Image (cartoon, rainbow, N blue to C red):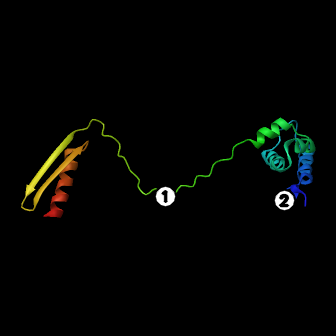
Amino acid sequence: MPRSKTSGLTIEAVQARFADWRQHRKGRSAIPDELWSAAAELARREGVSQIAAGLRLDGGKLKRRMAVPRKPVRRTGPSAFLELIAPAARGGPEYIVELEGRAGKLRIHCKGSTAADLATLSRALWDAVA
């Protein structure tokens, strides 16, 4: 079996596709990527000069098309740890609130919060502990 039939893509089939494209193209439009890909696949198996001549292509352009890097496939597993960084406070006030009662002590250190937010938070935490 000839090498050109190993992947189902033959030079005859690609020649027919090029002939159809050449017959129906409008003006001097560029060769579509799918035709370049088919030509490059054949050239990898059969050789650049043979395929370029058979398809009436510029061998240098075909060679460059063969060298176009394919997109790498990233095969990374899921992250085991994801760090979320809160946006920095923009020069807001800084508070340290210490509460002490029969159940123990509570210390809250906040940056960029309002006093009302701290009062609500400390009340909710203190009520949960008491």
Q: Position of residue 66 (x, y in %)?
A: 77, 43
Disc 1 residue type (three-letter): Pro
* Residue at screen point 51% across, 58% down: 77
Q: Position of residue 4 (x, y in %)?
A: 87, 55
**Location of the C terminus (image quadrant):** bottom left
Mark 1 nearby-residue class (10 Å; few <14, some 14–19, many ≥20): few
The residue beneath circle 2 is: 6
Disc 2 residue type (three-letter): Thr
* Front label number (2 vs 1): 2
Q: Is residue 27 left or right of residue 82?
A: right
Q: Is residue 50 left or right of residue 128?
A: right
Q: Position of residue 76 (x, y in %)?
A: 53, 55
Q: Is residue 121 left or right of residue 3?
A: left
Q: Which mark is residue 58?
A: none
Name which quarter of the figure residue 53 lies in.
Answer: top right
Q: Position of residue 110 (x, y in %)?
A: 22, 45
Q: Between 80 and 123, which is closer to the camera in this rendering?
A: 80
**Mark 2: secondary structure:** loop
Name which quarter of the figure residue 93 lies in.
Answer: top left
**Mark 1: secondary structure:** loop
The residue beneath circle 1 is: 78
Callout 2 touching callout 1 (CB < 8 Å): no
**Location of the N terminus (image quadrant):** bottom right
Outermost residue on the left side: it is: 102
* Residue at screen point 84% across, 59% down: 6
* Residue at screen point 58% across, 52% down: 74
CA–CA distance in space, label 2 to label 1: 38 Å
Mark 2 nearby-residue class (10 Å; few <14, some 14–19, many ≥20): few
Mark 2 or 1, nearer chain start = 2
